[in-house]
Image (cartoon, grey):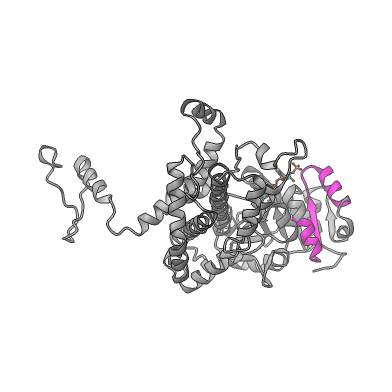
Amino acid sequence: MTGTTGPADIGLIGLGTMGAMLALNIAEKGFRIAVWNRTSAVTTKFAAGAGELAANIVPTGTLAELVAAIARPRRIILMVPAGAAVDESIAHLKPLLAADDLIIDAGNSDFHDTNRRAKAAVAGETPHFLGIGVSGGEEGARHGPSIMAGGEAADWTRAAPVLEAIAARYDGSPCATYMGAAGAGHFVKAVHNGIEYADMQMIAEVYGVMRDGLGLRADEIAGVFERWNEGPLKSYLIEISAAVSRATDPKTGKAMLDVILDRAGQKGTGKWTAIEALQLGAPIPVIDAAVMARNVSSRLDERREGEALFGPAPKRFADGAVSLAQLEQALIAGKILCYAQGFGLLATASTAYAWDLPMPAIARVWRAGCIIRSAMLNDMAAALERAPTRSLIQDPVFIGLIRTAEPGLRTVVGQGALHGHPMPALSSGLSWFDLMRTARSTANMIQAQRDFFGAHGFERVDDTATGLHGPWGSHAPA
Ligand code: NDP
């Protein structure tokens, strides 16, 4: 740290929602930060509004000024939209920087892009490069995000003093962790976002059961979420679900939730997670279902036509068909199954890409600052500490939790199906669980079919030979 005069400790490009908050966070932690924004008026406004933190902020009008303002070897954070803007920023910086300077892309970049940029840096074509996933939204960026870093370990060592200082803290430890080479940090961030989609979808599904199946008002639902937030489901997303259920629309006086259109947006990180999981052959059906559900939600006109054709789906439950306790258990089970899938994907990617991802540390880095922070992550970190690549559903603590919660999930999904409640995420979780506990599945039929039409061969239950064929008569494979 250099204090309030002299060269800046670090630079930042992109004073949008996230960049502005990160810059204030960095300045607040006592670092002197030089900032530059493509639109100069934004820089001027930002510096003017920084209050007492302005003493630690060096506004600059050109990229050259920014670079000149930073102590060497330089560290420069990019907080611009993922994609072309990152490549353009690197291209503009390259002629101005020295070989040992470090560019830190803190946006939501696709990890394939980060791999490419990291490779160029390692080859000496560009300055050093780190790709870091930053979670926690605007509030997190300002007061403590969760940070998942990828790149060269030595570059992380250079960036860590600033990034650990601004990160969220859990029991005093910073939620900022080096995940591995190149795109490892952005990959972990993408999986975080995929899990976030699934967590949100499962909460929305139990909200739907309370609203349409049990006939509860939004304020009553708020009370349920508030109670759940004092138990095993304690988490940021349950907390904000209670808050949004409790809010009143200033325009109509109705519950805010009741006047919000049921069409959800997305920026693509959930879809990336689903695509990467498919590529890796790592099953994450709860996350897939959550991404799919957002896509379906946006087809509002088609859904309205469907309701006109077939009548509305969700029906009220008979008294006692589903209790609030069973709903809570369903969400607990769904959450465990979803995280088991997410960590399973991370373990598969870690092997496939030779990242050696620090599995327990991933659970730990998500315990504060990020959107999916929750009490349960503490137990998950402990489980992954016991066996980093073992599925959470095989950990002794989670075996116990699943045994307790599974009947609730089964009742909710079963009653939901009988009463027309769409539950893509919770039902996918249950099906996956049933698949994972079925030693004799139905894939023997798939193998027989494949052999019948394509001579793909099969193995027998009573023989170790491979490439066997069936007695398919006149259709027998050649
Ligand atoms: P904003 O749209 O608020 O800000 C974008 C910033 O990037 C602006 O300062 C803009 O400058 C600048 N910019 C855009 N294009 C270029 C370019 N070609 N060259 C240089 N500067 C450019 O975005 P956010 O702050 O919300 O997001 C930034 C990154 O952080 C994204 O990757 C996003 O996915 C990620 N992120 C966002 C979160 C959020 O909650 N918003 C959470 C976690 C990550 P100008 O003023 O000139 O337009």
Q: Is residue 399 left or right of residue 457?
A: right
Quarter that holds the N terminus: bottom right
- 461 horizontally vs 389: left or right: left
Does 27 lie within the magenta span? yes
Closer-to-camera residue (64/152): 152
Residue 349 magenta-highlighted = no
For the C terminus, the image quarter is top left
- Whether residue 77 sits left or right of residue 405 in the image: it is right
Q: Is residue 418 above or below residue 68?
A: above
* Closer to the camera in the image, 191 or 36: 191
* Residue found at x 16% / y 52%: 468
Q: Where is residue 39 shown, x and y percent of the image? A: 79, 42
Q: Which residues are magenta?
A: 22-48
Give the residue drawn at x 62%, y 54%. 224
Task: Give the image quarter of residue 300.
Answer: top right
Task: Give how far across and how far down residue 159 sits, in percent.
Answer: 68, 65
Is 173 in front, or is 299? 299
- Where is residue 105 shown, x and y percent of the image? 65, 54
At x 43%, y 64%, the residue is 403
- Location of residue 304 with respect to 286 vertically, above or below: above
